Image (tube, rainbow, N blue to C red):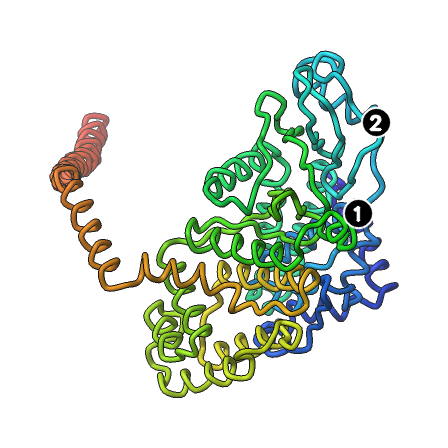
Amino acid sequence: MFGWVFHIGRIIKVGYTLSRHDALTDLIKIFGERPKRFAKLSRVKLNNNGGEPETNLVNALQDLGPSFIKIGQALATRPDIIGAETALDLMKLQDQVPPFSSKEAKQIITQDLGASIDTLFREFEDEPIAAASIAQVHMAITTDNKKVAVKVLRPGIAKAFSRDLEAFQWLAGMVELFSREARRLRPSKVVETIADVIEREMDLRLEAAAAAELKQNMKDNPYYDVPDVDWDLTSRRVLTTNWVEGIPFKKLDEIKKAGLDPKKLSENLVQGFLSQALNDGFFHADLHQGNLFACSSNKVTAIDFGIMGRLDLRTRRALADIMFGFANQDYDRIAKAHFDMGYVPKDQDYIDFKQAIRAIGEPVVGKPLSEISAGKMLGQLFETTSRFNMHTQPQLILLQKTMVTAEGVALNLNPEINMWEASRPVIEKWVSENLSPMARAKDTLKTTLDTLSRLPRIVEDVEQLVHQTKEMQSHQSRRRSSLKLFLYGVVGGIIGSAICYSLYILLQQ
């Protein structure tokens, strides 16, 4: 009944923190200048390690605590909603918060897995090796002597998110009630989107499934690995994987001392990421240094699969055409891909668009990544596509956002890496296998055969639809007949009642 009192109190606290960090203008900019949100991306600065927070909003969210850090990270996956500039900046939210007690962690494990810690593990380290906004990780050894990493959901975090999001949903509803402009921008929909992203991260079984899928997809790549999931020790609030024996990417000196090759590691990272995106349409979308390890034989091992991206085959083909075009200065191919996919409306001038793409690609040809500003290049791309009325493509923007992060990590390992040269083997192989005339002919044949194989089912569906239509028409006809009979009965009853009443009056006289 008095929920609104809590909502107001919570929002006042948030507003105070935003004001203290002078972040209200950043927040207003997200929803108040949406038509201009792509044009400003060129002002985003990224250093080799992903950069320090460039906006006050990032600092304010970190000050507000775990709930708001995760909300900011969830927003970063939707640049179509908040704008590319803000999304790139929110990538730099530092997901480091104080750990919760090992006693609470053990209670959660015991409750979820239905057995005591001593029964499940031979050893369990009380001190977590990492603590983030949603969960923390403990090292343990199973009863069969396997070294594992045990990720445990932070206690009460689901309730905290629910409480904060409920307050924002109430505020969004109030704003929409009194503002026509707010109704146009639909802040309630934004809150719902954030809630959906976070809800998926609240179930560690979904992260485990993502890890298993990526592991399966990358099984034939000797230079990229994903930890195995121990499903017997995994639940909604607990995720157990085998321990990664490697050196974190952020410890470059240790990588060199171990005799590993930073140059090779950077190439393996870039090529592994592109292989995921192009070959499988399922990629790790949180490739910061803390989630990457250098292992023996220069193998890259990734962890933390809470944020993943997906691309359908049609989008992958467009992406390959675009990247292949940039790598080979084939701007006609890039422009054609945009028009064929409908990214750029047909009423736009093809020649003008191709010239605009050339203006983006030519300045970076042959240059090392250290001389290329990924943020500026993306800013030019979004500015160009926006000028040609290109509709926002969330899946591509998430991919491009992840590429910016991967570039930063690769550059830290090898300042002379050329993104296009490192990408070329993966792109050219995929193009030859999927976009050559023979590949397209095979794809057309496969589509035709698939359609023919489904033809009996299609015929059955059509027959069923016709039958249902006839039944509906027959039912409607029966309903019309019943309605007529009902109306006739009503009218007859009224007339009969009138006659009887008249006879009654006559007999009384």
Foreground residue among 361 and 478: 361
Q: Residue 182: x percent and y percent?
A: 61, 65
Q: Which of the image's four quarters has the N terminus?
A: top right
Q: Which of the image's four quarters has the C terminus?
A: top left
Contact flag, marks 2 and 1 (Cβ < 8 Å): no
**Kind of element beneath mark 2:** loop
Circle 2 packing at 10 Å, graded few (<14), some (14-19), many (20+), is some
Residue 483 relative to residue 240: left or right? left
Q: For the residue marked with disc 2, what is the amino acid? A: Asp
Per the image, the residue denoted by label 2 is: 126
Per the image, the residue denoted by label 1 is: 96
Q: For the residue marked with disc 1, what is the amino acid? A: Gln
Foreground residue among 396 and 179: 396
Foreground residue among 185 and 312: 312
Residue 465 relative to residue 169: left or right? left
Q: Residue 390: x percent and y percent?
A: 45, 74
Question: From this viewpoint, which residue is outermost toward the right?
Answer: 20
Asked whether residue 157 appears in the rendered view, the answer is yes
Residue 180 relative to residue 331: left or right? right
